[in-house]
Amino acid sequence: MRYDIGELIAKEFLLSKDLKSVDMTGYECDEGKADAICIDESGCHVLVNVETHRKRGVEEPKQVYNVKRMRRVLMCYLADHPEVKAARYDHILTTIYTGNGAEVAYTPGLASKER
C-alpha cells in the first residue's frame, strides 16, 4: 500500500483528534470517494476527504468541496454498511511547504446522515 505525504500527515492529524480506527484505504462508490474512514467517540463513522497542496509561492490554497456529492457518498456508504447508524463527512486540506513543514486545515461535519 502506498500513501502520499499529505495522507500520512492527515492520518497523524486524525489520530491526534482521538478518532479511532483510522483506515486510509478509504471508500469509493459511483457517487465519489473518501480517502479515510474513522470512528469518533460516539461511534459515528467519519468519512474524510484529504486534499494536498504544495505551497511554492504566496498564494493561499483554497479548500474545495461539493456538499451535495458528500451527501450522496454518505448515503451509499450507509447502504453498503447496514450496521452503521450514523456517518459524517469531513475535509482535510494539507499544505506542504517548500523546504520544510506542513499545515493542516480541518473542516469537520460538512455533511452527515443518520438512520
Image: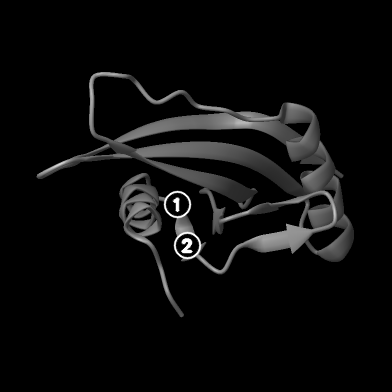
Q: Which mark is residue 82?
A: none
Q: Position of residue 29 (x, y in %)?
A: 80, 59
Left or right position of 103 against 41: left
Left or right position of 6 against 32: left
Quadrant of the image occupied by residue 96? top left
Q: Secondary structure at mark 1?
A: loop
Left or right position of 54 against 2: left
The 10 Å Cα crowd at callout 1, few under 14, some 14 to 19, many 20 or more, is: many
The three-letter amino acid code for the residue at tag 2 is Val
Q: Nearer the viewer, mark 1 or mark 2?
A: 2
Pick whichever, 56 or 101, lies toward us. 56
Q: Kindly identify which residue carries mark 1.
A: 19
Quadrant of the image occupied by residue 59? top left
Left or right position of 94 against 33: left
Establish if 50 lies above or below 61: below
Can residue 82 be seen here?
no
Q: Kindly identify which residue carries mark 2.
A: 22
Q: In the rendered view, how is the structure colored?
A: one colour
The three-letter amino acid code for the residue at tag 1 is Leu
Quarter the C terminus occupies: top right
Identify the residue at horizontal 71%, vertical 46% (top origin).
Answer: 87
Asked if labels 2 and 1 touch by Cβ distance under 8 angstroms, the answer is yes
Q: Position of residue 48 (x, y in %)?
A: 56, 47
Identify the residue at horizontal 50%, vertical 65% (top origin).
Answer: 24
Measure the alpha-carbon separation of dots 1 and 2. Answer: 7 Å
